[in-house]
Amino acid sequence: MPAYQRIAADLRAQITSGELGAGAQLPTEQELADRYDVARQTVRNGLGILVAEGLVVSQRPLGHFVRQREHMVYRPQGETSPQPASPEMDRFCQQILAEGRTPSQTIDVALVAATPDIAQRLAIDVGALVVVRRRIRFINGEPINTNDSHYPHELVKDSEIMSPADILVGANQKLAELGYPQDRVIDEIFFRMPTPEEAQRLDLGPGIPVAIHIATGYMKDGLPVRCTVNVLPGDRHMMVYERSWA
Amino acid sequence: MPAYQRIAADLRAQITSGELGAGAQLPTEQELADRYDVARQTVRNGLGILVAEGLVVSQRPLGHFVRQREHMVYRPQGETSPQPASPEMDRFCQQILAEGRTPSQTIDVALVAATPDIAQRLAIDVGALVVVRRRIRFINGEPINTNDSHYPHELVKDSEIMSPADILVGANQKLAELGYPQDRVIDEIFFRMPTPEEAQRLDLGPGIPVAIHIATGYMKDGLPVRCTVNVLPGDRHMMVYERSWA
DNA sequence: AAGTGGTCTAGACCACGAT
DNA sequence: TCGTGGTCTAGACCACTTA
């Protein structure tokens, strides 16, 4: 096994065994180079593995630290239809839903050309105009996720949906009032490493994947009227739900 | 911007724009070093970013290539309760469910001490004996996911569940026949970078995150009797489901 | 001011697979 | 055999934060 992999394996074992607890500082690169009798660059290769795994963060110029597992956010699968909680469900939520947290969000609205992804789901031409309401949600000032809702421009022009402010009744209710009530929603979820833009928008460190949740809303006649793209950082989200066993 | 980041950004732009399509070979490290007038190590730093993002794979000693997006696997959220498919749902599934595929799996069974994660969910002591049925599922010979079901040893000892073979009626049905029918299931889903063991078991390349799906089954009286841990590679899974809009 | 990690160089040798 | 990426060295200078 190459030296840098052995260094990474040694440190990983110390972290998973608890010998190096959450938040603990790792030895400096020079210390590790001396201890293993290798060049500093070789140590850096090893640390790079742990950083890419999300186990370790570099806080320049303080050093490398074991990553603190942040508080996870409870995100019920159906925000619109909370299920009756059983005692077991309560137990799970209790330890996830923590103390007083103050949510906030930023909103901006833009008129853009549809990307292929959006165009396909909204059943419009690539490049056609869509209105996108971009939101970043924060809890205690930390970005938690992004939520970009796309609407065909023809459907929502000159409506409140194009205003970059909170919509009290909710954008979906407003869409219904405009004559486009949703009847069905198809959800797609997949996960990958973030793009640099996503990493910057959500303040993601290396080694943190994101889940992409795309919700497309259809009217009763099958016409898609909304496509929402959520980006959820892996270190801040956990999905929990309950189902009965048939 | 440092040189290696600029190199990564240039190549990333060429990939996302389609100038370098899926499967295309990137210039060699030496070519890039000459083109940008930097040392080869600097080029390697840049390529390392793209590899960590999952955009590029290294096929030694052939070179670096744009990663092929593999066929995604349709994984319905509730395998036990298929929902009636709407025309929109059909459209989504159609492009995901591909041609003839041959599934297979490996099974092994072990008697192990409960880890803290499992012990907590099964409401037993850490270190207590649990039976674990470990499965790796393959499609066309490629590993698709792992599925490790844990049962308290007291509940299943001397039963067919401890045999490392297929259980025709299904392990959950067999568990019910033993007197432990499940009434509710709580699902937890989160995602992170894989451990080296997970990466090896599932043949994961760098830059591929995994989703962890933990399903815990409870009897009517609240006793947990099963805890299944699924590991789903991000490049081989997509979750799709439909819900009606209340 | 000191010490950390971040970036970069100019070499070197090796492992591996295609030809 | 050849060319690729993989690993490693021994330096160097810089940016940044804390003390």
Image (cartoon, coloured by chain):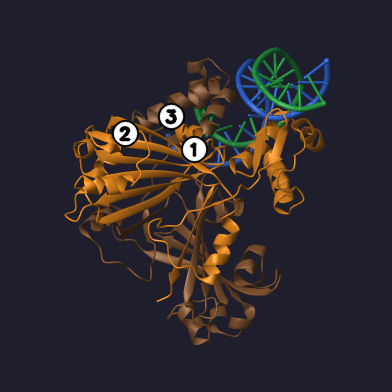
Chain colours: A orange, B brown, C blue, D green
Question: What is the x, y in percent for residue A45?
Answer: 65, 35
**Pointers 2 and 3 in contact (CB under 8 A)?**
no
Q: Amino acid at mark 1?
A: Glu
Q: Amino acid at mark 3?
A: Arg
Taking A237 as reference, is C4 left or right? right
**Mark 1 surroundings within 10 Å by alpha-carbon count, few (fewer than 14), some (14 through 19), many (20 or more):** many
**Pointers 3 and 1 in contact (CB under 8 A)?**
yes
Chain holding disc 2: A
Q: CA distance from mark 3 to mark 1?
A: 10 Å
Q: Give the image quarter of residue B125.
A: bottom right
Chain holding disc 3: B
Same subunit, labels 3 and 1: the answer reads yes
Question: What is the x, y in percent for residue B121?
Answer: 60, 68
- Between B120 and B115, the one lying in front of the other is B120
Quadrant (top left/top right/bottom left/bottom right) for the N terminus of chain A: top right
Which of the numbered marks, if any, corresponds to residue A163? 2
| Foreground label between 2 and 3 | 2
- Between A51 and B100, the one lying in front of the other is A51
The mark nearer the N terminus, 3 or 1, is 3
Name the residue located 19 percent from the left edge and 47 percent from the top edge: A179
